[in-house]
Amino acid sequence: MATRRIISGEKTILEKDDKDFAQPEGGKSNIAPAVPAHVIYKLLGFTLAMVVGPIGSYFLTLNLLFRGNSTYAGAFAAIMANVVLIGYVVVAFQEDQTDQMEAKEKEKREGKKVI
Amino acid sequence: MADSDLTPKFAPFFGMAGIAAAMTFGCFGAAYGTAKSGIGIAGVGTFRPDLIMKSLIPVVMSGIIAVYSLVIAVLIAGDMGPPPAQNYSLFNGFMHLACGLSVGLTGMAAGYAIGIVGDMGVRSYMQQSRIFVGMVLILIFGEVLGLYGLIVALILNTKSRG
């Protein structure tokens, strides 16, 4: 069972007390969605680019740019697919860096509060 | 048009087989890559949801394998036509079969490589973040196999107008 989860460190929903779910006194309840909107937009954008980008660029450039030479148009479509991939890798890296910066800022703010 | 030795009636069969081979084999590899690396991402996501965005790279790469197959299938389909309008030679039929098989089977190989590397790679990435660059590099080398098949298919396809 190599794929089994290690569940000893986790609390199941039955083991949690009511206070685990309760809001802090006087604080607003956290109603922010689990996945922020900008991430959803990013993923939707890449999905659309992956579906439409390469094959759309093939048919666009076939007669407009390469004058019916389907080999160049096909190669161009393959290049477009790789451009989408590189764009995704770059965005994923940036996402990671912004997460780290946010965490650092949060740490700073909380550190000041304690002092 | 006459049914000659160079353009027999059964020649389009091989061209059609090439289209079907490109699409089905390529998508077989892409599906395996997506599913296998998806299992790994689901395993990682329960522990480290913040890594999901970076772990999705093998899935995007599997999608590109399918795009290669799609491009070749569309390319071959563009060269074919119903018999009275077009003389479809046996040479073209075999050539299109070679195009479809080369892009389809290399796509399948690349999809298998991406699936296995993606699954194990994202699981290891959860524990050791330095493995990410290596994982992406291995994934790129895996995907390049599909790209080679695409290049061969594109070069073969130019011979139809000779």
Image (cartoon, grey):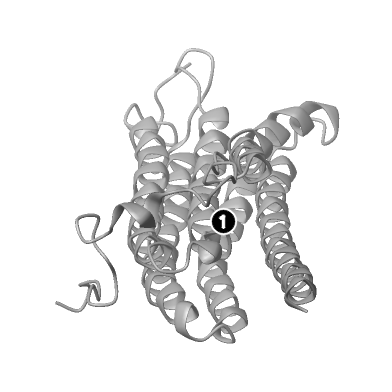
Using residue B46 as the reference point, say whether residue A53 is left or right of it.
right
Q: Is residue B144 above or below residue B102?
A: below
Question: Which residue is at 55% across, 52% downward?
Answer: B64
User: Residue A20's spot in the image, x, y percent?
Assistant: 37, 57
- Asked which quadrant contains residue B36, the reply is bottom left
Taking the view exactly as shown, the residue that stands out farthest to the right is A65
Question: Which residue is at 69% across, 29% downward?
Answer: A59
Using residue A36 as the reference point, say whether residue A20 is left or right of it.
left
Residue receiving disc 1: B150
Amino acid type, residue under disc 1 in the picture: Leu
Q: Chain of mark 1?
A: B
Taking the view exactly as shown, the residue that stands out farthest to the left is A1
Secondary structure at badge 1 equals helix
Residue B53 visible: yes
Q: Is residue B140 above or below residue B108?
A: below
Question: Which residue is at 54% across, 39% downward?
Answer: A31
Using residue B17 as the reference point, say whether residue B52 is left or right of it.
right
Q: Nearer the viewer, residue A35 or A40?
A: A35
Residue B55 visible: no
Q: Quadrant of the C terminus of chain B?
A: top right
User: Residue A90's spot in the image, x, y percent?
Assistant: 73, 62
User: Residue B133's spot in the image, x, y percent?
Assistant: 62, 81
User: Residue B131's spot in the image, x, y percent?
Assistant: 55, 85
Q: Nearer the viewer, residue B25 or B6?
A: B25
